[in-house]
Image: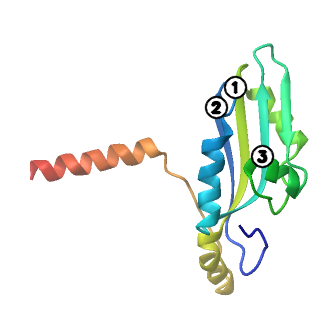
Amino acid sequence: MSTATTGPIGPVDLAVIGFRGELRQGGIRDAVARAVDKGAVRVLDVLLVRKDDDGSVLMYDAESPEGAEELLGFPTVMPDLVGEEDALSIAAEMDPGTTVLVIAWENVWASEIAAEVRELDGQLLVMERLPREDIEVALSAIASNEEGS
């Protein structure tokens, strides 16, 4: 699994993912590894924050490629991109008994598109993620219309 930076750089997302209780890493670790193996994303950094029921905060910051490898099963490219200050801000908003996984990843799949936009002196004006629920409602409406036709 390569983490080397070569070629154009794609857009970078910061995903903050919340879980009730403790994170069972196997499933999420495997899903991220598959995305990396497919060349869809390159993981830049990862951070894990846990807030116990008593309000105490535990943080695992992968400050080195080896630390990320322990958490994810492979090294990251830019350890410490997300750090302790970020973790403390996140922890302040967390409910007790929850865990938050923060992953910064490059969308490798979009790197050539991004490079071409830059080459043409273009700039991204708006980029927005549509919530899954909104897409499901739209697909359901389309299916209903097709059934009614």
Q: Amino acid at mark 3?
A: Leu
Which is nearer the N-term, disc 2 or disc 3?
2
Q: Amino acid at mark 1?
A: Thr
Read off the residue under disc 2. Answer: 19
- Label 3 crowd bin: few (<14), some (14–19), many (20+), radius 10 Å: some
- Residue 56, x across and y down, in percent: 85, 20
**Structural distance between the alpha carbons of marks 1 and 2:** 6 Å
Q: Amino acid at mark 2?
A: Phe
Q: Nearer the viewer, mark 2 or mark 3?
A: 3
Q: Residue at x 63, y 54 (%)?
A: 32
The residue lying toward the viewer, choosing from 108 and 116, is 108
Q: Is residue 117 left or right of residue 84?
A: left
- Residue 85, x across and y down, in percent: 89, 40
Which is nearer the N-term, disc 1 or disc 2?
2
Kindly indicate whether the residue at mark 3 contacts the one at mark 2 (C-beta within 8 angstroms): no
Which is nearer the N-term, disc 3 or disc 1?
3
The residue sitting at the bottom extreme is 120
Q: Residue at x 60, y 60 (%)?
A: 35
- Above or below residue 113? Residue 140 is above
Q: Residue at x 42, y 41 (%)?
A: 133
**Structural distance between the alpha carbons of marks 3 and 1:** 18 Å
Residue 134 is drawn in which quadrant?
A: top left
Read off the residue under disc 1. Answer: 98
The residue lying toward the viewer, choosing from 118 and 46, is 46
- Residue 22, x across and y down, in percent: 70, 28
The residue lying toward the viewer, choosing from 123 and 2, is 2
- Above or below residue 51? Residue 66 is below
Q: What SS does tag 2 mark?
A: strand
- Label 1 crowd bin: few (<14), some (14–19), many (20+), radius 10 Å: many
